[in-house]
């Protein structure tokens, strides 16, 4: 039975009234000092005993709290398309379990496929490079001939200078062609990346809970979300507790949490808000709850008594038991 403050005040008043009555049930006489002293002694003793045995424990019980919230997915991701386009394929359904980086949907990529083919041909084209290398080889041979002629005094310094310049120009042309091939390779890689962006993949391992688009719909920058995936192997519970409860616990501590359907689990305190809500006077305390077996449903009522312990959170477990 829960004792309210009104009940306590009424009971205290009754005790005080009872203590004003003498030992024989008669009102205390103001003119009888002995009887008045006896009445006041009895009043003091009975009141002290009442406070120790009844009011004190009841007031202490008021310090034991029980706060409630609802469990939520630890991670809930709205998967959006990084590029706009027409949705051509959806490979999963609501309720499906998906793995990390699994392909979920596909945007129209026919134009990019053609661009990729053009980029592939351009980056593999080698005719310009072979021509430039051939020209470089010719100018190098000419320079070597002029050097031999210069040793026998059959060539002038001016001819040597022209031959040297021709080699430098031919070498620069080779470098220009190689730079162009690097640019083509980069364009090819960019097209590959754009094609990859047309593939919608799951960033986490989880469950598909909502699909927001249909095949054939246009995905625009203003509405890019295609589906939602949640990770239910871990849950979170965010309580709003009085300030004195928040200051008595710390990050890393564990606590026993009660859920619906007579389920009890262990939660790890992951975050304590540094500020107090001025309207409610409460502080947000966030728990992480291991749920590898899926025994704890998501979205059910969760209760906490405000007590936390220094227990290794690696031993987090889920058991069954009565809901307190």
Image (cartoon, helix red, strand yellow):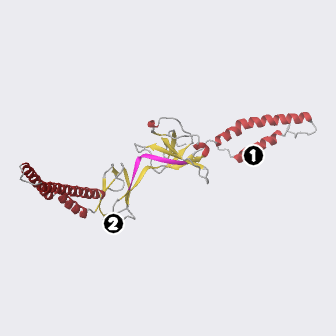
Q: Nearer the viewer, residue 111 or 167?
A: 167
Q: Position of residue 59 (x, y in %)?
A: 68, 41
Disc 1 crowd, CA 10 A, few/some/many (<14, 14-19, 20+): few
Would residue 105 be visible to someone looking at this image? no
**Apparent side of residue 12 relative to residue 261 in the rendered image (left or right):** right
Residue drawn at the location 59% of the way across and 52% of the way down: 277
Mark 2 or mark 1, which is nearer to you? 2
Residue drawn at the location 9% of the way across and 52% of the way down: 146
Image quarter where the C terminus lies is top right
Q: Check disc 2 and report its element: helix, strand or loop.
A: strand
Disc 2 crowd, CA 10 A, few/some/many (<14, 14-19, 20+): some
Judged by its main secondary structure, the magenta piece is: strand
Q: Position of residue 3 (x, y in %)?
A: 67, 44
| Quarter assignment of residue 234 | top left
- First to last magenta residue range: 228-239
Residue 240 lies, with reference to residue 217, above or below; the image says: above
Q: Mark 1 points at which residue?
A: 10
Q: Residue 218 carries which label?
A: 2
Q: Position of residue 151 (x, y in %)?
A: 8, 48
Q: Residue 53 carries which label?
A: none
Residue 222 lies, with reference to residue 309, above or below; the image says: below
Image quarter where the N terminus lies is top right
Q: Which of 33 and 238 is in front in this view?
A: 238
Q: Check disc 1 and report its element: helix, strand or loop.
A: helix
């Amino acid at each position: 039975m829960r004792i309210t403050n009104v009940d306590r005040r009424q009971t205290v008043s009754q005790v005080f009234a009872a203590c004003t009555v003498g030992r024989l049930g008669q009102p205390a006489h103001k003119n009888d000092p002995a009887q008045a002293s006896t009445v006041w002694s009895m009043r003091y003793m009975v009141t002290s005993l009442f406070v120790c045995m009844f009011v004190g424990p009841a007031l202490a019980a008021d310090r034991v709290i029980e706060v409630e919230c609802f469990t939520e997915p630890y991670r809930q991701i709205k998967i959006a398309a990084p590029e706009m386009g027409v949705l051509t394929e959806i490979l999963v359904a609501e309720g499906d379990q998906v793995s990390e980086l699994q392909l979920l949907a596909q945007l129209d990529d026919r134009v990019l496929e053609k661009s990729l083919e053009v980029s592939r041909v351009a980056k593999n084209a080698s005719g310009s490079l072979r021509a430039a290398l051939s020209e470089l080889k010719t100018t190098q041979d000419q320079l070597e001939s002029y050097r031999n002629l210069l040793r026998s005094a059959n060539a002038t310094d001016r001819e040597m200078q022209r031959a040297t310049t021709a080699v430098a120009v031919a070498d620069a042309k080779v470098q220009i062609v190689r730079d162009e091939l690097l640019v083509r390779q980069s364009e090819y890689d960019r097209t590959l990346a754009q094609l990859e962006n047309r593939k919608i993949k799951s960033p986490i391992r989880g469950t598909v809970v909502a699909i927001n688009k249909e095949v054939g719909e246009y995905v625009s920058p203003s509405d890019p979300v295609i589906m939602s995936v949640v990770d239910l192997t871990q849950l979170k519970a965010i309580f709003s507790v009085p300030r004195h409860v928040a200051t008595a616990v710390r990050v890393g501590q564990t606590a026993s949490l009660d859920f619906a359907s007579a389920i009890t689990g262990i939660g790890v305190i992951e975050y304590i808000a540094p500020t107090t809500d001025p309207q409610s006077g409460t502080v947000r305390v966030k728990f992480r709850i291991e749920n590898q077996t899926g025994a704890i449903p998501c979205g059910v009522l969760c209760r906490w008594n405000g007590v936390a312990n220094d227990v290794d959170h690696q031993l987090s477990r889920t058991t069954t038991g009565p809901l307190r």
